[in-house]
Image (spheres, rainbow, N blue to C red):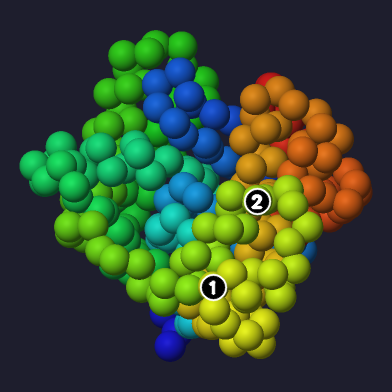
Amino acid sequence: MQATLFVPPAAMPHSKHEFSRFFRADDIAPLECLDAFYREQVFAPHFHEEYVVNALLAGAQAYRHRGGNHIAGVGALVLMNPGEVHTGECAHQQGWAYRGFYPSASLIGQLAAEISGQSTAMPYFRETVVLDPQLAAQLNQLHALLRDSQDTLQRESALYAVFSQVVLRHMQIAERPQRPWPQAVERARQMLADCLADNLSLATLAAAVGLSPWQLNRQFSRHLGLPPVAWRNQLRVVRARQMLAGGHSPATAAQALGFADQPHLTRIFRQALGITPAAYQRSLRR
């Protein structure tokens, strides 16, 4: 399956160099934002615990997601639910630029509950690429406002106004579904999350959930998109982002999360986010 949305590219950033500029808007909501431009960057398979809402500003991005290959161009939104594994790379000779938003599951869940009146609502994106130039422009404006304004009321009002449109236009709101994977896979996933820094073996995990190592590796990859070791490494990256945002050093995060050393964290972190842990932390401080 392939979804292709491509329109003529807008003007590229003046800089010829790739960049990733993160900031957080935690003073008004649990939300991380990104301004990025890439030419050569190739993202390894990874996931976010938050929702992903990216507005394409220039060029085009290609990525693999939900078993299909997708291309998003200018005016398109790239939308993903928490935990969905995806990649990322250039699909235009000049690169691609976008404004990214990573709202927490609690933020989107609360907003969806207020809109729908369902306290147990589970919002999820129906499609991963949608062409919505109007909303993409609104997201671009919101990004600049959240980054530059000190007016709390204005920032909060704009945030809820724009993201309510994201929910209304592109999300399905339903009762909380059961996990779409077997109980054994869920138990293994939870063990990895609970013992994130531990050196668990595949045999230990498999014995705990009643499968052979081969069966667990196969079922885990099939249902979650990554084998257990890769899924664990990506969750470590997610937790490292939280620690770095909280002021911990990359060395402290690497040790606390079970990485072999700081260079190991740096290599996995950069493959997933296109930036080193130290540069990510400096970006947040700015």
Q: Quadrant of the N terminus?
A: bottom left
- Residue 168: x percent and y percent? 19, 50
Observer-nearest of 215 and 149: 215
Give above or below for 216 relative to 31: below
Secondary structure type for disc 2: loop
Observer-nearest of 229 and 136: 229
Q: Badge 2: few (under 14), some or many (20 or more) residues near its Cα, within 10 Å?
A: few
Give above or below for 70 relative to 114: below
Q: Is residue 101 left or right of 127 when viewed as pictured?
A: right
Q: Residue at x 25, y 63 (%)?
A: 177
Q: Is residue 276 left or right of 97 when viewed as pictured?
A: right
Disc number placed over residue 195 in the picture, else none: 2
Q: Residue at x 41, y 76 (%)?
A: 182
Observer-nearest of 78 and 273: 273
Q: Badge 1: few (under 14), some or many (20 or more) residues near its Cα, within 10 Å?
A: some
Disc number placed over residue 47 in the picture, else none: none
Observer-nearest of 241 and 221: 221
Q: Which residue is mark 1?
A: 209
Q: Quadrant of the C terminus?
A: top right
Type of amino acid under label 1: Val
Residue 192 visible (yes or no) = yes
Q: Quadrant of residue 34?
A: top right
- Residue 231: x percent and y percent? 63, 64
